[in-house]
Image (cartoon, grey):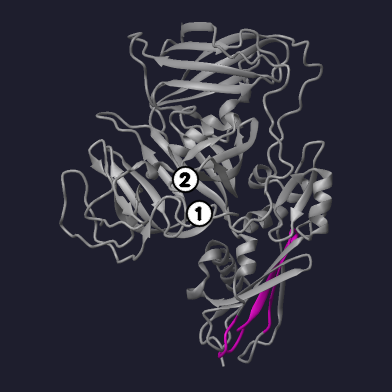
């Protein structure tokens, strides 16, 4: 039986000086093995991605978490069944997604997830769309001399090996790239089911291309036996809202100082507090109605009668400005304004690629909109509550994370991550030893020692949510004073440090890394305690475990700075 499947050999053969008209294949080290989309995918795998696609809100990012629950039999076909949660601005969408076994493309699932499945298919599993190799009994042959396939004339090919750090950790990757004419890249990892990062661009014959799709792996766990989404429920648009968002209102006006023209459409016709509003905005040349501008940096504001901004959609999305590469943008948001007249402003900073400050004079268009009262909504809904993960990632202290009224805050014992679950679920998780309902304070300790030296050869540092305690005791030499110093340290600084380490990966490390007996040079240790769990690892600087590289280097540098500040040199 023959199956069509993309298999990418990971033997990067040096081809120095060989170049076709589209791409250069660079001289790279040997990297044995092969890779294909879905390699090693198994029941219990959990993934969390941040992703976007140009076809959905001009690449506005959302978070997609999915867990491979197991097999699903549909007729004679066996599929993967994945539970899915999508966090898309104000909405939470919970559902299921069916993935193919041969290639893990979405081939069914919850109707409400359809648009997100399409983005998933066109980004994370996009590489499976290249039917360039025939497999017989699951084995195929090809080489990097035969790249995967052309994209608008440029061959998709392996171009480098690269060690990258993303929210899910530090990874050794192979980089696939092509040129359209901007270089697009996808980072893959051998024996890992999906690419872990991508930044790709649309093909343009002139001008600056816009992002086609972009994604990054936020978290990965394996052998997850119970659904990680238990207790998470969909949060749709407020009940009682008008679901007909046809943009019936049409506005075409020049901006205040006649620098631009704006053609805007919005709906519903009678927006109400707590409900969604949808806009289509076109940025047009002041000289020619038929010319749509591109690379527009702008914001959508609510202002008071003095034109003072009181709300910024860009700020709510964690951005300095909104960006429309094509000059046409779709924008939706929840109306927070009270009944009456809301002063909406489309504020244009200028025309320039992202990361470049526009040289044009800014300008704006004020659009008064009447906000109606909806009799079906008796009380105003509260501001949307972010997921525990988003609250945690935004810097909120774990103990201060807020759950919806009907959910309870618990903390996973293995990594102290917060979760909001139903009270009955919380009770079961606590009984099974999976979670606790009161957050134990995390204490980080680190230290150094050397087998043969005089002076301050060893010492330790303790970091809490209140202070850093620095301690060192001399060994021989001219120094005799034991040093104790206390330095102020905040909960925010501690949490910033904790975010650099995955506690599950830390706890899984061996107690000693790269040490053969006593260390001849300076060795380091790190200890993390969280309630009853205490874990210490010891290593030399050149043997920092890759799983905690950023975290360990941060502590080593902090230790070095404190030694310089508080310890004097000692001689024999």
Q: Which residues are magenta?
A: 449-473
Q: Whole-percent x and y of residue 303?
A: 62, 18
Seen in the picture, residue 433 relative to 394 is either above or below; the reply is below
**Label drawn at residue 41:** 1
Mark 2 and mark 1: span between their CA atoms? Answer: 9 Å
Direction from residue 404 to residue 554 in the image, left or right: left
Residue bearing mark 2: 104
Task: Report if residue 464 lies within the magenta region.
Answer: yes
Direction from residue 157 to residue 315 in the image, left or right: right
Seen in the picture, residue 289 relative to 214 is either above or below; the reply is above
Name the residue: 69% across, 31% down: 235
**Label drawn at residue 63:** none
SS category of the residue bearing label 1:
loop
SS category of the residue bearing label 2:
loop
The answer to whether any part of residue 320 appears in the image is no
The answer to whether any part of residue 542 appears in the image is yes
Q: Whole-percent x and y of residue 40?
A: 48, 57
Q: Foreground: 454 or 375?
A: 375
Dot 2 and dot 1 residues touching (CB under 8 Å): yes
């Amino acid at each position: 039986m023959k199956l069509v499947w993309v298999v990418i050999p990971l033997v990067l053969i040096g081809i120095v000086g060989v170049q076709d008209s589209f791409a250069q294949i660079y001289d790279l080290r040997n990297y044995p093995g092969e890779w294909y989309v879905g390699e090693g995918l198994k029941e219990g795998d959990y993934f969390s991605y941040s992703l976007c696609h140009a076809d959905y809100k001009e690449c506005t990012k959302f978070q997609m978490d999915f867990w491979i629950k197991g097999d699903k039999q549909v007729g004679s076909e066996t599929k993967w069944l994945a539970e899915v949660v999508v966090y898309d601005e104000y909405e939470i969408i919970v559902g299921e997604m069916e993935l193919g076994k041969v290639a893990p493309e979405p081939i069914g699932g919850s109707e409400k997830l359809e648009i997100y499945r399409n983005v998933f298919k066109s980004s994370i599993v996009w590489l499976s769309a290249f039917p360039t190799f025939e497999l017989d009994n699951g084995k195929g042959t090809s080489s990097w001399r035969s790249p995967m396939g052309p994209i608008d004339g440029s061959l998709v090919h392996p171009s480098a090996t690269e060690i990258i750090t993303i929210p899910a950790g530090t990874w050794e990757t192979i980089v696939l790239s092509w040129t359209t004419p901007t270089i697009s890249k996808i980072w893959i990892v051998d024996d890992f089911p999906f690419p872990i990062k991508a930044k790709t661009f649309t093909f343009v014959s002139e001008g600056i291309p816009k992002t086609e799709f972009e994604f990054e792996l936020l978290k990965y766990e394996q052998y997850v036996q119970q659904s990680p989404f238990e207790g998470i429920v969909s949060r749709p648009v407020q009940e009682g809202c008008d679901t007909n968002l046809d943009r019936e209102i049409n506005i075409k006006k020049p901006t205040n100082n006649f620098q631009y023209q704006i053609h805007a459409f919005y709906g519903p016709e009678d927006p109400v507090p707590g409900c969604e509003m949808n806009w289509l905005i076109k940025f047009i040349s002041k000289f020619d109605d038929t010319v749509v501008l591109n690379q527009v940096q702008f914001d959508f504001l609510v202002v008071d009668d003095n034109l003072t901004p009181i709300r910024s959609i860009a700020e709510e999305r964690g951005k300095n400005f909104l960006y429309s590469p094509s000059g046409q943008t779709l924008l939706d948001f929840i109306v927070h304004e009270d009944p009456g007249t809301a002063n909406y402003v489309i504020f244009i900073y200028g025309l320039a690629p992202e990361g470049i400050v526009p040289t044009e004079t800014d300008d704006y268009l004020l659009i008064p909109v009447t906000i109606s009262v909806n009799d079906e909504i008796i009380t105003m809904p509260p501001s949307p509550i972010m997921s525990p993960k988003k609250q945690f990632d935004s810097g909120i202290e774990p103990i201060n994370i807020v759950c919806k009224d009907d959910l309870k805050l618990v903390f996973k014992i293995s990594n102290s991550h917060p979760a909001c679950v139903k009270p009955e679920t919380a009770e079961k998780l606590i009984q099974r030893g999976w979670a606790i309902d009161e957050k134990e304070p995390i204490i980080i300790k680190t230290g150094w020692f050397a087998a043969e030296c005089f002076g301050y050869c060893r010492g330790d540092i303790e970091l809490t949510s209140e202070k850093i305690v620095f301690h060192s005791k001399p060994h021989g030499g001219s120094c005799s004073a034991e040093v104790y110093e206390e330095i102020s340290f905040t909960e925010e600084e501690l949490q910033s440090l904790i975010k650099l380490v995955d506690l599950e990966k830390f706890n899984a490390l061996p107690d000693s890394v790269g040490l053969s007996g006593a260390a001849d040079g300076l060795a380091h240790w790190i200890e993390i305690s969280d309630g009853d769990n205490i874990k210490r690892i010891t290593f030399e600087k050149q043997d920092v475990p890759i799983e905690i590289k950023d975290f360990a280097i941060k502590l080593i540098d902090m230790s070095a700075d404190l030694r310089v500040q508080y310890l004097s040199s000692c001689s024999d």
